[in-house]
Image (tube, rainbow, N blue to C red):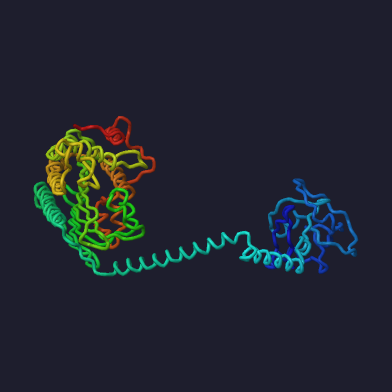
Amino acid sequence: MSIRIARSSCFARRVLTPSVLRSSLPSLRNISQSSRISASPLSSLSSTLRTPPSQERRIHNSTSSPPPSPPVDPSTPTRTAIHAAQVEEALGIKTPTNYGPKGVQYYPQAHEMGKPSWRMRYLIYGLFAGGILFIISPSHSPFKDHVAISMHSGIEESADLVAWEKRRATIAEREKAPFEVPSSSMYNEMVDYIRSLQLSITQGIEELEAEVAPRGVTPVKFLQDSWERANNGGSGTSCVIQGGTVMEKGGVNVSVVHGRLPPRAVAQMRADHAGLEHVEAGESLPYAACGISLVLHANNPMAPTCHMNYRYFETYDPDDLTKPIATWFGGGSDLTPNYLFDEDAKHFHQTYKDACDQHGEAYYPELKEWCDKYFYIPHREEERGIGGVFFDDLDPNSAIHRKSEKFKDVGPSPADILAFVKTLGDSFLPAYLPILRKRYNLPYTEEHKRWQQIRRGRYVEFNLVNDRGTKFGLMTPGARVESILMTLPTTARWEYYSDMPAKDSEEERLMKVLRKPIAWL
């Protein structure tokens, strides 16, 4: 037996199943077999009450306790009637306090809930099915023209689906085939340059470590880790240094890779490159890319972190790998101090301005502004550092070239852009090494070290949340995660509502510049 509790006038019910009743059996042992509850054996339940069926479904809300039930003749057949509050107490159920006439709530059986008979149900089903048949009949339907059009459209859609399936099969077969990159002269020249730049930078840092290492201590050197991508997808060399006198951790990576860009990466690039507009949605794209990327984290909080990256990208027609459809350069370098020394900032920016001015007077101000915008941390509303130079998607058609007198009428050639990138790359050691020499051995306190760790936390946030290069690398199939995350420091710190920076402190002075970048030159 199940008792349905009518909870509202629209017959929202709670069913007391046999399992619930069994669990409450000690409280309901004296329910009579005649489906009514006697008042005498159970003090916690109400006595039965004879009530006309017409009043049975009249339910109204009441916030007061139900009045006591009048005595009735137990021999008289009655419907099941129980005080709601007593049922709740006995069964441990919380239901709305809805009491019917005389404070009694009724629980009608299923057949009393307005359920249609089986004859009525079959009649309804028959009328419904007949109406459907009438509507879809070509000779009677008022929508027969629409049905015909829909059928014709369905045939066209089926044809399109077959064509799309064939196209997908072609793409799948092409992606399984061996993939060899056609080596353009520009690509090969860029590869040779970044490998030589990696060597010169690692040698420069190692020479500094050897120069300042304490007597009797073996200077640290870069660990070289050469690797190859799966399926003959390229190779690279990661050079990592840790635990030095100057460097806590640093890495200089070179990657020379090729493969097929996943559709989501192609979609990201399509907005910035006109040559990719005609690539079909959902299709991968053959590419070749080479680049150098470095990040150096110093031990001393007074010595800044520095980042540099230069890369070259080529994409090819999926049906003709000898035909590049879009090529571009990107990169730059920026300085991230924990404590601000104006002379360091001016030296760094002046070095890169001199390099830019060799190719056009408009490059430095444009790339400096671009850098400030790119290395902005939106969720912190501050810059990652004090900037430098930055550019992306740079090709002969980029508008930035026309702002220099040299390229006012005719834009640069790809060879001109490569020469520009080489000049910037060669400026890294002159821009950064003199700063390290001055700051690596300055005295510092535990509070200075604590602030360094907090600023490194910001560095990590930008790299993992905002940096396009990190996100692109992690979404590329076969990515070498260790090399991508090499840029992260060994240690960082996050404090909940930190008390740093204090008012009028050196830390606050830095934050003012990070929240509102300034012109250093």
Depth order, front residue of 429/30: 429
- Residue 347: quadrant of the picture: top left
Depth order, front residue of 61/479: 479
Examine the rendered structure and indicate whether residue 112 appears above or below residue 351: below
- Residue 436: quadrant of the picture: top left
Examine the rendered structure and indicate whether residue 168 appears above or below residue 423: below
Q: In this view, does 508 lie to the left or right of 24?
A: left
Q: In this view, does 159 lie to the left or right of 16?
A: left
- Residue 321: quadrant of the picture: bottom left
Q: Picture coordinates of residue 451 (x, y %)?
A: 29, 41
Q: Picture coordinates of residue 511 (x, y %)?
A: 30, 35
Specify the quadrant that holds the N terminus.
bottom right
Q: Picture coordinates of residue 93 (x, y %)?
A: 69, 57
Depth order, front residue of 31/60: 60
Q: Can residue 203 be seen in this view?
A: yes
Q: Is residue 450 visible?
A: no
Q: Picture coordinates of residue 355 (x, y %)?
A: 13, 40
Q: Is residue 72 left or right of residue 192?
A: right
Examine the rendered structure and indicate whether residue 450 appears above or below residue 216: above
Q: In this view, does 415 lie to the left or right of 458?
A: left
* Residue at the spot 32% in from the left edge and 33% down from the top edge: 502
> Total marks drawn?
0
Depth order, front residue of 504/79: 79
Examine the rendered structure and indicate whether residue 430 appears above or below residue 29: above
